[in-house]
Amino acid sequence: MFNMIQNAAVRQGRYGSDLSDLFGGDAQLQETAARYDEIASKTKTDFGRAEPPSYISQLIKLAKQGRRVSSYEELMKILHPNS
């Protein structure tokens, strides 16, 4: 999931531009991610699991800065370096 979202953000990889186009381009991809993150952050459970991921916008932002993330743990270290 991390790779596909980041590829869509920078329109790279096998399906990056296709995914970006599916969401209507860069602006719509970012808007959709922000909306999803907002909804996910308010949702406490996801079919009995913990909570759904609410970091899609951050993945897009990091990809546009040239930083690639391959795991949730790595993302948390970047977002919260002192934790």
Image: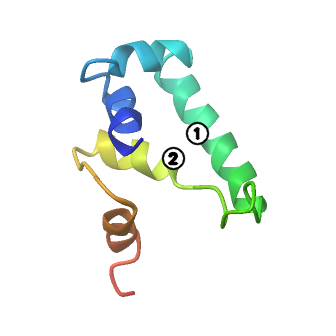
Comparing 33 with 46, the one in front is 46
Tell me, yes or no, whether the two marked residues, 1 and 2, touch with CB atoms within 8 Å.
yes
**Left or right of residue 15: residue 57:** right
Q: Residue at x 39, y 87 (%)?
A: 83
Q: Residue at x 38, y 31 (%)?
A: 9
Q: Position of residue 31 (x, y in %)?
A: 61, 33
Comparing 47 with 22, the one in front is 47
Q: Residue at x 32, y 22 (%)?
A: 11
Above or below, 16 against 75 in this view is: above
Label 2 crowd (10 A; few <14 / some 14-19 / many >=20):
many
Q: Which residue is mark 1?
A: 33
Above or below, 51 against 31 in this view is: below
Label 1 crowd (10 A; few <14 / some 14-19 / many >=20):
many
**Left or right of residue 43: residue 30:** left
Tag of residue 57: 2
Q: Quadrant of the N terminus?
A: top left
Residue type highlighted by circle 2: Ser
At numbered mark 1, what does the secondary structure look like: helix, strand or loop?
Answer: helix
